[in-house]
Amino acid sequence: MFNEVYDVIVVGAGHAGSEAAAAAANMGSKTLLITMNLQTIAQMSCNPAMGGIAKGQIVREIDALGGYSGIVSDTSAIQFKMLNKSKGPAMWSPRVQSDRMRFAEDWRLMLEKTKNLDFYQEMVSGLIVKNHKVIGVKTSLGLEVKAKTVVLTNGTFLNGLIHIGDKNFGGGRAGERASSGITEQLEDLGFESGRMKTGTPPRVDGRSLDFSKMIEQPGDENPEKFSYLDITKPLEHQRSCHMTYTSPKVHDLLREGFERSPMFNGRIKSVGPRYCPSIEDKINRFADKERHQLFVEPEGWNTVEVYVNGFSTSLPEDVQFKALRSVVGFENVKFFRPGYAIEYDYFPPTQLKYTLETKLIEGLYFAGQINGTTGYEEAASQGLMAGINASLKVKEKEAFILKRNEAYIGVLIDDLITKGTEEPYRMFTSRAEYRTLLRQDNADFRLTPKGYALGLASEKRLRRMEKKQKESDAFVQFFKDTSVKPEEANPVLESKGSSLVKQSDKMFKIFSRPNIGINDVRKFKAVENYIQEHNLDREVIEQTEIQVKYSGYIEKEKNNADKLNRLEYVKIPSNYDFSKIKSMSLEAREKLKTIQPTTVSQASRISGVSPNDISVLLVYMGR
């Protein structure tokens, strides 16, 4: 079986590994996916959900490029919500509650249907490297498999250590062993490594909860979906989540276990995710708060297992149990398993190129939590990009890189390789300076042509996107060209408390008013006739409204992006000697030498490099 040389070997089958393997195989590369357990492909190790603030945008970008995460999120969803709908469209973020078992099953079945993809179950214990180039992997049984490129997506498994109170044991996640050997070899090859921590809450028996005492959290009345393809459909039925709260009594019970907590007694020294703190961290850092929200999330359509979102902890199991039984609705709770913290190895991502290929070893790519990120969506997007670029490298084609104004994925990778991270990195809309351009509704316009050019997005996907774009552009033009008379416009304007018009005016101008929405202008006969005549769907109508109402903001952001992008085209030669630029600050020279930016624009985003340093750099480069 392994006499041949694979184009791409992907190590690990979590969210990053699954997307990497699918991308490489779909682009025609002979691919092997090696994982320690084929029964846990694309396992949702933490919460059973996909998307959320900024993360939902990433899932739609993955889908637009031809990845699988959006499709699987739709087929396994039990609830859909569009978050931040009360804010502007740049902030709208889709999220699904998922059926954990169905999510993993659907991922595996999709991968099994993917051509050019082989599977193998075993632990990879090391890499085969020759002359600073990876040529394969070694397994724990001594098997050697050759490859032209290797993508490492080891998640939390590299020397993983699980903590529950004063107990700890090796493991990559509950019930699964850790992976050893790779970190030590990479360090010998010159890589810098570090340790990070993440945690997960207890899973409980839903039959033991009293949901009548909690606040119901239903899905959207008219749910949407993630994938732009019509092979998935919006949910017809949904399962509700519920919300309850901790209390001072719960906090007091938790504090009793602090001296046995690995987080407070010094046994855990690594840094955890700031934006998803453990319950003990929350009551310690926010001592003035009398309660914290807990979201009670079902793990699937039929299972009784429930995820207690907001109660992530590594406290002793008896303390967890006692405190949780004091939460309203949890008085008779039964545990499926306690919460725990896990420490694992990662490699600071400043050691990577934009393609996610390592600078030290040619053909070796890192994706996911090995790069210091947290979250399924962040991992999946890196896996997709690593898989794409590994395949392109084998074919000796130009690398595929997304800029900050093109995708949240571009923001994520640029942040990682330019700034690095000393704590688990999580994507937020605030990290993107072009978030008006990077909306969840237009990811197909931005990225599907690129995915199609790669051979990843299908022609059907491209044609569907082009039809949507053509229809929305035509509808926008209709508003620019069509006037409405005062006698038809004013009743609508008056009902919205908007100033009346004295003469016929273009609909675009009226529609652009802040308090006038699509449902208001649909009261104009010509608008409703146009929608019916052209059989416009929800996506086209929503896209048109955004293009009309936010045209000024969108145009301004495009202009800003164009100005800054000029520096993207000012390339810095590889292995440029920054030490010779004596008029630049010492800190800037050291940072530039370490990170080796490829463009002046990337150099300008490095912490410690000032605008004055960039001016000096441009002078030295003859600009």
Image: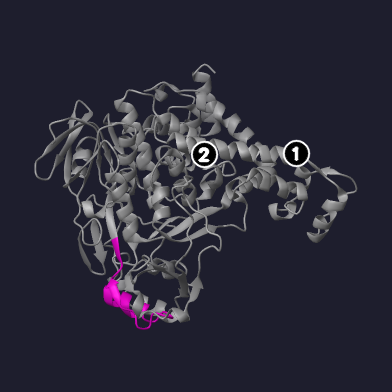
Give the quarter of the image for residue 10: top left
- Residue 443 in the image, given as x and y percentages of width and height: 52, 42
Q: Along the horizontal axis of the image, is 592 left or right of 202?
A: right
Amino acid type at circle 1 is Lys
Residue beneath label 2, please? Answer: 464
- Callout 1: SS: helix
Q: CA distance from mark 1 to mark 2?
A: 25 Å
Label drawn at residue 275: none
On the question of residue 64 being in view, the answer is: yes
- Callout 2: SS: helix
- Looking at the rendering, the stretch of residues picked out in magenta corresponds to 316-341
Residue beneath label 1, please? Answer: 480
- Residue 238 in the image, given as x and y percentages of width and height: 46, 65
Q: Which mark sits nearer the N-terminus, 1 or 2?
A: 2
Q: Along the horizontal axis of the image, is 2 left or right of 250?
A: left
Mark 2 neighbour class, 10 Å CA radius: few under 14, some 14 to 19, many 20 or more: some
